[in-house]
Image (tube, rainbow, N blue to C red):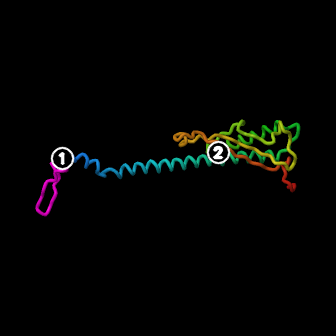
Amino acid sequence: MGAREETEKGVRLNRSATGPNWLINRWRSERGANLIEMSFIVVLMLALVVGAVDLGFAYQHYGVVLNASREGARLYSRTPCLSSNRAALRSAIINAVVNETNATTNRAGVRILPQNVTISPDPTSAGCPAPGAPVEVRVRVLYRSQFGELIGLGEIPISASATMMHYGSDTSQSGS
């Protein structure tokens, strides 16, 4: 049956609602459009929130890697470098970097392996740096992005380095 329409002369039956135009009028209806628009907005907002959280985790990884490189550079700048202890010094620097990320305060889950640590100048190959010369410890890791795998990023390289002046002893420049 058609829809009823009231006019000045009385009630009449609207035949267009029952005829062949019924399907076309139904398709032109905007009923449900709000639901579809809302679903697009929700998906977009969810992607932005998840991306921001993932970016926050990457930044947390960077902070852990930066602290580990600082710890290695600090040890390198303060430990005496002699011809007899160069291999042990290199191992101690790498262990300091690796142990910094294995501490109980590392809740980010960053895992630094010895092959991810670069020391410049390398005490085993380049010899000991002169007092006052810069020493650098660089750490590189791959951050496995949770959201990035969905958009094709996968792993994000994170690198941090710390440069300090080599003193060669466990005292500051002023001797204190």
The local crowd at label 1, few if under 14, some if 14 to 19, many if 20 or more residues have their Cα within 10 Å, is few
**Number of the label disc, if any, that sits on residue 176:** none
Please provide percent x and percent y for residue 152. Answer: 54, 39
Regarding mark 1 in the picture, which secondary structure is present there? loop
Q: Is residue 87 magenta?
A: no
Labelled pair 2, 1 in contact (Cβ < 8 Å): no
Per the image, label 2 sits on a secondary structure element best described as loop
Give x and y (percent) for residue 135.
80, 46
Estimate how packed mark 2 is, as few (under 14), some (14 to 19) or many (20 or more) residues with alpha carbons within 10 Å: some
Say which quadrant the C terminus sits in.
bottom right
Q: What is the magenta range?
A: 1-17
| Label 2 or label 1, whichever comes before in sequence order | 1
Q: Residue furthest left?
A: 9
Q: Position of residue 168 (x, y in %)?
A: 86, 47
Q: Amino acid at mark 2?
A: Asn
Viewer-nearest residue: 65 or 32: 32
Residue at 56% across / 46% down in the picture? 54
Q: Which residue is mark 1?
A: 19
Of residue 16 and residue 72, the one placed in the foreground of this image is: 16
Question: How many marks can you see?
Answer: 2
Q: Which residue has dot 2 on it?
A: 106
92 relative position to 106: left or right: right
**In front: 129, or 101?**
129
